[in-house]
Amino acid sequence: MGNIAMSNVLITGGAGFIGANLCERLLRNGDTVTCLDNFSTSNRENVAHLLGDPNFTLMIGDVRSTIRVDADTIYNLACPASPPKYQIDPVYTTETCVLGAINVLELARRTGARVFHASTSEVYGEPQCSPQPETYRGNVNPWGPRACYDEGKRCAEALFYDYSTKYGVDVRVARIFNTYGPRMHPDDGRVVSNFIVQALGGRPLTIYGDGMQTRSLCYVDDLLSGFEALMSGPSVPHPVNLGNPHELTILEIAELVIELVGRPATIRRLPLPQDDPTQRCPDIGVARSLLGWEPRVAVEDGLRRTVTYFAGQLAASQPRRDRIAEAAE
Ligand code: NAD
Ligand code: UDP
């Protein structure tokens, strides 16, 4: 990617939404890519199109165990990211965050690799300021249903900087805000994939709470340009926010999706999950000034591309669904 030419890259969680997009981008750049994944929130199909590439290796494995791969560059993305998914087995989620970080950092320590870590805006919890700058220390419930993810990611950040200070590992930590785009799992449970799949299927859009909570949506290509800027430049001794500061209410996101899908749709109200943050918007001043990065894809354009992707996925799976329905009759 960029000026890190011809790297030997390990991507943990490489079959997931962001990981599969990153695999594609790095292979296009001429890098050699090993994707390590246990398919807990993804599947082989997300990277099946890459299997014939001689520069691509798929390794089925778990970051909670010691990792033995030759790499000069590591991206640590392995972790369930959708709230309903990471809450299914919270102990697993914490282990993936913490043991995964240690195993990745030990590998970087042995190989001398530069290592990127996917942290999250969730480290800010229910924010008391907006937008959220990196200096804000957050307001996380340490024992609620989101704690496995929020505290796991906070502990991982601590480990990344401890390995940097103690062992001189070259670490880069991004705090990623809500990102969307092609290769999200249709049953992932996150707001963009839910709304698009519901609207395309002619089902009501599920709005949790009053829909006035906000998120700021970043298109995946923009996010990956941010990864590139963070990985290719000089070391940054603190986490960097990567996200799109265009803040929208969940109701506004629903309206946009309905408009782009172009079919009449209804809304179904469901209870707001516990500890669901009421506001999220990144302060990207640091990314702008240090990395020269900012998002370029307008939310309407990114959502349109994502609707097209899901429409294609649903059309491709329709004959299979018809066969299953016929067999069941
Ligand atoms: P995803 O669920 O689509 O992908 C995660 C991948 O990690 C999946 O392929 C999953 O099978 C794999 N995985 C999970 N546990 C594993 C384990 N123990 N060992 C090996 N593989 C494992 O999620 P995503 O949206 O692609 O997120 C990727 C990373 O970015 C995550 O670390 C997430 O916390 C972070 N992040 C994402 C967002 C976002 O909006 N997408 C926001 C903030 C942070
Ligand atoms: N949400 C919603 N309907 C859905 C899925 C999510 O209203 O079908 C809301 C959810 O309550 C949250 C926001 O959308 O306020 C973003 O949820 P998501 O799970 O995508 O990510 P989060 O930012 O909460 O981790």
Image: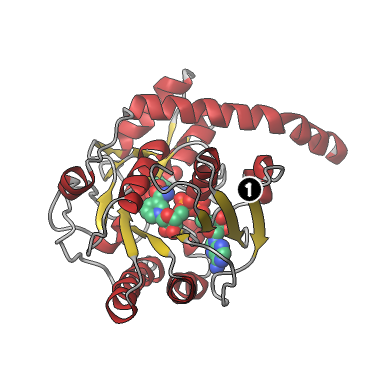
Which residue is under mark 1? 55
For residue 48, what is the image quadrant?
top right
Q: Among all residues in the image, which is located at the extreme top?
A: 262
Expressed as whole percent of the image width and height from the top left, the position of residue 5 reads: 45, 46
Q: Quadrant of the N terminus?
A: top left
Viewer can see residue 201: no
Viewer can see residue 211: yes
Residue at the image point whose x is 82% and y is 34% from the top: 323
Nearest the viewer among 99 and 289 is: 289
Label 1: which secondary element: loop
Above or below, comparing residue 129 to residue 318 in the picture: below
- Is ligand 1 closer than 8 angstroms to the Cβ of mark 1? no
Expressed as whole percent of the image width and height from the top left, the position of residue 277 reads: 27, 55
Three-letter code for the amino acid on which mark 1 is drawn: Asn
Above or below, comparing residue 95 to residue 234 in the picture: below
Above or below, comparing residue 78 to residue 281 in the picture: below
Residue at the image point whose x is 32% and y is 69% from the top: 157
Residue at the image point whose x is 34% and y is 50% from the top: 232
